[in-house]
Amino acid sequence: MVIERSDGHLRVIAGLAKGRRLKSPVGLATRPTTDRIKESIFSILHPYLLESYVLDLFSGTGNLGIEALSRGAEKAIFVDNNKNSIRVICENIEITGFKEKSKVFHQEALKTIRELAHLEQKYDIVFMDPPYLKGFIIPCVQAIEEEGLLSSTGIIVIEHDSKDVLPEKFAKLTRIKNRKYGNTTISIYSEEA
């Protein structure tokens, strides 16, 4: 999960909920992310955000999905398998006033991907920020492709350890951006035009 701290608190950095402080689970190992990285992600996402459907896998605090809602996304699905994270995601959705635009799944990402496929909803933005170097990324991207969850113009934004080398291409997806920030890399994939 991408974490932005302000005086020890997470916060939304732009849009309708700008400046709102978010909660973080006690004892959860987080990777604080600078304003620079978060702004970089959302400057890339700007053309995709308005009225978009967002899937936030490995949500942690819900920070990325909430930021997307704040900047004009229509709906966000939050997924995490940690009960403390789920509690905090729900609190943060309430704090920011996005309860009506949100749905929260307390389960494994792969299981949720398979379940969402039956709802026939396509997602314009998929965030993935799994625990580093644990092998979650490739199976999840492959499942998203297999289940057809991504809209034709959709993108997948993956935050990962810089040592975790991801492929240039999956079946239909090609990496369109790859930005390194020290130990963290942001890789973005979309279908070839």
Image (cartoon, rainbow, N blue to C red):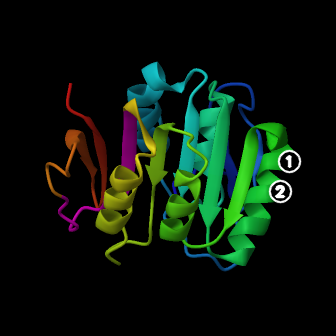
- Counting from the top left corner in percent of width and height, residue 180 is at 25, 49
- Counting from the top left corner in percent of width and height, residue 177 is at 24, 38
Image: magenta residue range: 154-166
Horizontal side of residue 18 vs 120, given as left or right? right
Give the residue type that dot 1 points to.
Glu
Determine the image quadrant of residue 75.
Answer: top right
Can the viewer see residue 103 in this picture? yes
The residue where tag 1 is placed is: 94
Can the viewer see residue 23 in this picture? no
Q: Nearer the viewer, residue 89 or 152?
A: 152
Circle 2 residues within 10 Å: few <14, some 14–19, many ≥20: some
Q: Secondary structure at mark 1?
A: helix
- Residue at 61% x, 61% y is 79
- Residue at 41% x, 43% y is 37
What is the CA distance from the residue labelled 2 to the residue labelled 1? 5 Å
Q: Is residue 71 above or below residue 11?
A: above
- Counting from the top left corner in percent of width and height, residue 9 is at 70, 55
Circle 1 residues within 10 Å: few <14, some 14–19, many ≥20: some
Horizontal side of residue 120 vs 143, given as left or right? right
- Residue at 20% x, 31% y is 192
Q: Is residue 165 above or below residue 52?
A: below
- Residue at 15% x, 56% y is 167
Give the residue type that dot 2 points to.
Glu
Task: Determine if the magenta segment contains residue 163.
Answer: yes
The residue where tag 2 is placed is: 91
Q: Is residue 24 above or below residue 82?
A: above
Say how many tags the image has. Answer: 2
- Counting from the top left corner in percent of width and height, residue 53 is at 58, 35
Q: Main structural element of the magenta stretch: helix, strand or loop?
A: strand
Q: Nearer the viewer, residue 51 or 163?
A: 51
Q: Secondary structure at mark 2?
A: helix
Task: Tell me if label 2 and label 1 are in contact, CB under 8 Å.
Answer: yes
